[in-house]
Image (cartoon, rainbow, N blue to C red):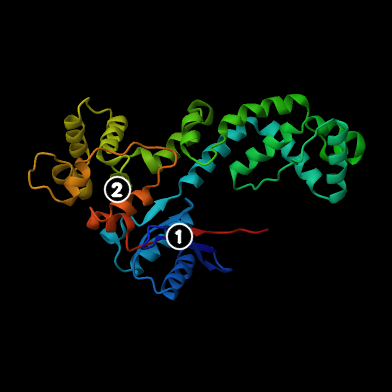
Amino acid sequence: MVVTAHFIDENWMMHKRIINFREIDSHKGEDMGRELLDCIRGWGMKNVMTITLDNAATNDKAIDFLVKKLPNLYEGGKHFQVKCMTHILNLIVKDGLKYQNYHVECIQKAVRYIRLSPQRINKFKKAMKDCGLQTKKFLCGDTPTRWNSTFELLKSAYELREAFTEFGIRDKSYERDLGRVPENYDFEVVTEMGSLRCGHTSKKVVNQTNVSRYGKRYEDEIRKVLGCYNKMNDFMYFAVLLDPTTKSPFLLHAFKKMIGGGSSQQEASQIAIDVDDDNDFFGDFLYTGGSNSDPTDNELRTYLKENIVNYKKDFSILGWWRVNAIRFPTIARMAKGDYFFLYFHNLFIN
């Protein structure tokens, strides 16, 4: 079991530290919860803001156990758990890969076969040379639980596809052991999967994934994180409001998209209140912090009334707050948070 803590220091530097790495005997939710609690207490943590886990029922039970034991949780731990976006994307894309599973598996098995021994690796490198492939790149392995590693495997295999046939001539056991080996058509089919790559952001996957191809899983899973305004974690609002490139205009835009609201900002604000008036944080923001009509500006109103910062690729939100913390000391403390963010991960090693 691995537990990673994320926190921001006094100089606005984000830190990520592995604070726990241990073997556990039971994968029952309550037992894992005890292990996590032991780790948190062992480090003397008094405030844990959120915890992110893979979306498994066992992990939900671990959260239920922790919520009962940890102090200082916002709204009694109602928003303590944050769904793991990368795990959801992994589920979505793995479902998508099933549509081309016949071709994907064929290439996967061939790559794993070649990478299994130094002798086969050398034979494949000689095959590459005979095919005139002048490159230092080689076949990538993959991890079943990480779809992006499958993409890298397919990409490297496609780039070296000409060497597979030559390798088959050199290795007499290749086709016999595998039964079916990759052909040109297999490689052509998997080139369509190039659009599945997310690179460093999840946005590209969400934009490029074809819903009709990947089915209901896309809608169901992505809605767990982004799509249900009445179930959305309150900390999502905090994150958007405290980002100087988004602030409240982005929230209003998002609500209009999610619920098909009106065309004006005022109308979008009213819709958000009507449909989600049980959300104390967001409702309070719209009635007070989001209003520009109150002449007695406080720190939050001043921050929100300023124009949003134009987003650029090299924009650093922590750098912005480092500079502007002197103007907005209270909000800066909120943005930094006197809390630890925990990421919990179960490792199943064969």
237 relative to 74, above or below:
above
Give the residue displayed 63% in from the left and 38% down from the top: 151
Asked if the residue at tag 2 contacts the one at tag 1, i.e. Cβ–Cβ closer than 8 Å, the answer is no
Determine which of the numbered discs, if any, sits on residue 242 in the image: 2
Q: Amino acid at mark 1?
A: His
Figure disc tally: 2
Quarter of the image holding residue 139? top right
The answer to whether residue 91 is seen in the rendering is yes
Q: Nearer the viewer, residue 304 or 277?
A: 304
The answer to whether residue 278 is seen in the rendering is no
Q: Nearer the viewer, residue 13 or 193?
A: 13
Cα–Cα span, label 1 and label 2: 19 Å
In the image, is 122 to the left or to the right of 66? right
In the image, is 196 to the left or to the right of 202? right
Q: Nearer the viewer, residue 135 or 191?
A: 135
Determine which of the numbered discs, if any, sits on residue 15 in the image: 1
In the image, is 274 to the left or to the right of 296? right
Q: Residues within 10 Å of mark 1 (few under 14, many from 20)?
A: few
| Picture coordinates of residue 207, whole percent (x, y) | 47, 30
Give the residue displayed 48% in from the left and 36% down from the top: 217
| Picture coordinates of residue 51, whole percent (x, y) | 41, 58
Q: Quadrant of the N terminus?
A: bottom right
Q: Amino acid at mark 2?
A: Leu
